[in-house]
Image (cartoon, helix red, strand yellow):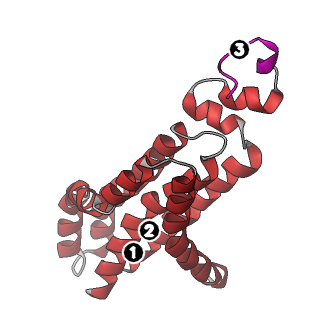
Amino acid sequence: MKALTSLVPFFALLNWLAAPVSIIWLMILGEWWVIGLAFLSLFSHFLLGIALLPAMAFAAPAAALSPRRPTAAMILGIPGLVYTAALITVWCMGVLTYLVSRATPSTWIPLLLLAFSIGTAPWAYMAQKEAQRGGGEGSLMAAFSAQVAFVAVLLAIVIFRPLSSLASFRGDHAGLCLRYRHCRSGHHAGRSS
């Protein structure tokens, strides 16, 4: 638990800096579309809140059963937890896939930072609001786990497949052409940038 607690300042700093740094970086590179996307992402927690409503169908009966039959309440609550975890995963990986699909060799690092921000910020915001109302430990842990997992995925992309990851997300050979330079010899002319 101490190891996780020591990561909290890192994630707080990353949450605070990822969006502004990536947006400024992308604007310097001439990627102005990112301003609109960043603005729209400010409202994503409303959509995600609506998408979380089906989980309440399981949470409410589980909470009602909790004082009398805690084991039954836990079993009844499992589908809601699985749904919430699936929604967090689909949202985070959907944001990452969308942004990396628009990446070029000069924009993929700031787009990874922006993906982290857009992917995890709504969950952190909703968890913070729930904690302010009292309780919310589960939401805070889910948001923190999503951030840890997202950083792990980003590190895997950066460390293990820096340029070829672009090709796998884009469905073309651009990243491979940059990495191996066989495309410039005429094998895949026009697709090497």
Residue 72, percent from left and from top: 28, 67
Amino acid on which disc 2 is placed: Ala
Mark number, residue 188: 3
The quarter holding residue 152 reads bottom right
Q: Secondary structure at mark 1?
A: helix
Horizontal side of residue 50 vs 138, given as left or right: left
In the image, what residue occupies the spot 62% across and 31% down? 168
In the image, what residue occupies the spot 66% across and 17% down? 190
Is the residue under label 2 in contact with that under label 1 (CB below 8 Å)? Answer: yes
Q: CA distance from mark 3 to mark 1?
A: 50 Å
Q: Give the labeled residue for mark 1.
A: 138
Whether residue 116 is visible: no
Amino acid on which disc 3 is placed: His
The quarter holding residue 70 reads bottom left
Q: Give the labeled residue for mark 2.
A: 142
Mark 3: give few (<14), some (14-19) or many (20+) Cα within 10 Å.
few
Which portion, as a residue range, is magenta? 183-193
Q: Nearer the viewer, residue 12 or 50?
A: 12
Horizontal side of residue 181 vs 55, given as left or right: right
In the image, what residue occupies the spot 30% across and 58% down? 44
Depicted 86 relative to depicted 63: above or below: above
Amino acid on which disc 1 is placed: Gly
